Image (cartoon, helix red, strand yellow):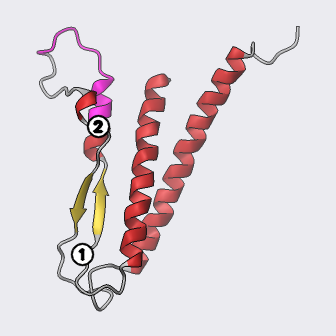
Amino acid sequence: MASSVKLLSNLLDYCTEKNRVIAKNISNLATEGYKRQDVIFKEVLNESSNSLMKVSSNRHISTLQDPSTSGGKFEYVNDESEEMVSGSNNVNIEREMSELAENTLRFKFASKKVGEYYRSMQNVIKGGGGRI
Protein backbone atom coordinates (compact mmCIF):
# COMPACT_ATOMS: atom_id res chain seq x y z
CA MET A 1 0.00 0.00 0.00
CA ALA A 2 2.88 2.39 0.71
CA SER A 3 3.95 2.16 -2.95
CA SER A 4 0.43 3.19 -3.98
CA VAL A 5 0.67 6.19 -1.68
CA LYS A 6 3.88 7.24 -3.46
CA LEU A 7 2.14 7.02 -6.83
CA LEU A 8 -0.84 8.95 -5.49
CA SER A 9 1.53 11.55 -4.06
CA ASN A 10 3.07 11.96 -7.51
CA LEU A 11 -0.46 12.32 -8.92
CA LEU A 12 -1.25 15.04 -6.37
CA ASP A 13 1.94 16.88 -7.36
CA TYR A 14 0.95 16.60 -11.01
CA CYS A 15 -2.60 17.84 -10.35
CA THR A 16 -1.24 20.83 -8.46
CA GLU A 17 1.08 21.72 -11.32
CA LYS A 18 -1.61 21.05 -13.93
CA ASN A 19 -3.96 23.40 -12.09
CA ARG A 20 -1.28 26.12 -12.09
CA VAL A 21 -0.75 25.74 -15.86
CA ILE A 22 -4.49 25.76 -16.58
CA ALA A 23 -4.87 28.94 -14.51
CA LYS A 24 -2.00 30.51 -16.47
CA ASN A 25 -3.68 29.58 -19.77
CA ILE A 26 -7.01 31.03 -18.65
CA SER A 27 -5.41 34.23 -17.37
CA ASN A 28 -3.71 34.71 -20.76
CA LEU A 29 -6.89 34.13 -22.76
CA ALA A 30 -6.73 37.59 -24.33
CA THR A 31 -2.93 37.92 -24.48
CA GLU A 32 -1.85 38.43 -28.08
CA GLY A 33 0.48 35.67 -29.33
CA TYR A 34 0.40 33.61 -26.11
CA LYS A 35 0.90 29.88 -26.69
CA ARG A 36 -1.20 27.52 -24.60
CA GLN A 37 0.85 25.32 -22.27
CA ASP A 38 0.39 21.83 -20.90
CA VAL A 39 2.13 19.53 -18.43
CA ILE A 40 3.15 15.97 -19.23
CA PHE A 41 2.82 13.43 -16.41
CA LYS A 42 3.41 10.19 -18.31
CA GLU A 43 7.17 10.13 -17.80
CA VAL A 44 6.87 10.72 -14.06
CA LEU A 45 4.30 7.93 -13.77
CA ASN A 46 6.51 5.55 -15.73
CA GLU A 47 9.53 6.37 -13.58
CA SER A 48 7.51 5.90 -10.40
CA SER A 49 6.10 2.60 -11.62
CA ASN A 50 9.53 1.37 -12.69
CA SER A 51 11.02 2.29 -9.34
CA LEU A 52 8.57 -0.08 -7.67
CA MET A 53 9.52 -3.10 -9.78
CA LYS A 54 11.55 -5.83 -8.14
CA VAL A 55 14.16 -7.54 -10.30
CA SER A 56 16.83 -10.05 -9.44
CA SER A 57 19.33 -8.62 -11.92
CA ASN A 58 19.87 -5.14 -13.31
CA ARG A 59 19.99 -6.70 -16.80
CA HIS A 60 16.37 -7.88 -16.68
CA ILE A 61 14.78 -4.53 -17.37
CA SER A 62 17.07 -2.23 -19.29
CA THR A 63 14.73 0.77 -19.08
CA LEU A 64 14.59 0.75 -15.28
CA GLN A 65 15.56 4.19 -14.08
CA ASP A 66 16.68 5.49 -10.73
CA PRO A 67 13.71 7.38 -9.21
CA SER A 68 16.06 9.87 -7.56
CA THR A 69 17.04 11.24 -10.98
CA SER A 70 13.53 12.41 -11.84
CA GLY A 71 13.48 15.03 -9.09
CA GLY A 72 9.69 15.26 -9.35
CA LYS A 73 9.98 17.52 -12.41
CA PHE A 74 7.29 17.67 -15.03
CA GLU A 75 7.69 18.34 -18.71
CA TYR A 76 6.06 21.55 -19.95
CA VAL A 77 5.04 21.79 -23.58
CA ASN A 78 3.71 24.65 -25.65
CA ASP A 79 0.75 23.99 -27.93
CA GLU A 80 2.12 25.11 -31.27
CA SER A 81 -1.18 24.95 -33.15
CA GLU A 82 -1.83 28.05 -35.21
CA GLU A 83 -5.61 28.01 -34.69
CA MET A 84 -6.62 31.30 -33.08
CA VAL A 85 -9.50 29.99 -30.97
CA SER A 86 -9.85 33.04 -28.72
CA GLY A 87 -9.15 35.53 -31.48
CA SER A 88 -5.70 36.47 -30.19
CA ASN A 89 -4.13 33.08 -29.33
CA ASN A 90 -4.74 29.32 -29.26
CA VAL A 91 -6.32 29.11 -25.78
CA ASN A 92 -9.79 27.54 -25.89
CA ILE A 93 -11.69 28.48 -22.72
CA GLU A 94 -14.07 25.51 -23.03
CA ARG A 95 -11.14 23.10 -23.24
CA GLU A 96 -9.39 24.72 -20.29
CA MET A 97 -12.51 24.58 -18.12
CA SER A 98 -13.06 20.94 -19.09
CA GLU A 99 -9.47 20.08 -18.17
CA LEU A 100 -9.84 22.01 -14.93
CA ALA A 101 -12.94 19.97 -13.98
CA GLU A 102 -11.18 16.71 -14.88
CA ASN A 103 -8.08 17.72 -12.93
CA THR A 104 -10.20 18.64 -9.90
CA LEU A 105 -11.83 15.21 -9.89
CA ARG A 106 -8.44 13.52 -10.21
CA PHE A 107 -7.07 15.59 -7.31
CA LYS A 108 -10.08 14.83 -5.10
CA PHE A 109 -9.75 11.10 -5.80
CA ALA A 110 -6.03 11.00 -5.02
CA SER A 111 -6.32 13.12 -1.88
CA LYS A 112 -9.20 10.98 -0.60
CA LYS A 113 -7.22 7.76 -1.13
CA VAL A 114 -4.11 9.16 0.54
CA GLY A 115 -6.24 10.39 3.44
CA GLU A 116 -7.85 6.96 3.81
CA TYR A 117 -4.43 5.32 3.94
CA TYR A 118 -3.16 7.62 6.68
CA ARG A 119 -6.40 7.29 8.66
CA SER A 120 -6.05 3.50 8.54
CA MET A 121 -2.42 3.77 9.67
CA GLN A 122 -3.50 6.05 12.52
CA ASN A 123 -6.17 3.51 13.49
CA VAL A 124 -3.57 0.72 13.56
CA ILE A 125 -1.21 2.82 15.66
CA LYS A 126 -3.98 3.60 18.14
CA GLY A 127 -4.73 -0.09 18.51
CA GLY A 128 -7.48 -0.70 16.01
CA GLY A 129 -10.06 1.50 17.69
CA GLY A 130 -11.94 -1.46 19.13
CA ARG A 131 -12.84 -2.01 22.77
CA ILE A 132 -12.05 -5.18 24.63
- Residue at coordinates 28% horizontally, 89% vertically from top-left? 88
Amino acid type at image mark 2? Gly
State the predominant SS element of the stretch in magenta: loop
Q: Which mark is residue 98?
A: none
Q: Position of residue 8 (x, y in %)?
A: 46, 38
Q: Which residue is denoted by mark 1 in the rendering?
A: 35
For the view shown, which residue lies furthest in the bottom direction? 87
Circle 2 SS class: loop
- Residue at coordinates 40% horizontally, 40% vertically from top-left? 10
Q: Which residue is denoted by mark 2 in the rendering?
A: 71
In the image, residue 112 sits, relative to residue 26, either above or below, namely above
**On the rendered image, what quadrant is the C terminus found in?**
top right
Q: Position of residue 59 (x, y in %)?
A: 11, 15
Quadrant in the picture for residue 35: bottom left
Q: Is residue 77 left or right of residue 48?
A: left
- The mark lying in front, picked from 2 and 1, is 2
Q: Is residue 129 left or right of residue 48?
A: right
Residue at mark 2 to residue at mark 1: CA–CA distance:
26 Å
Q: Which residues are magenta?
A: 47-59
Q: Is residue 50 magenta?
A: yes
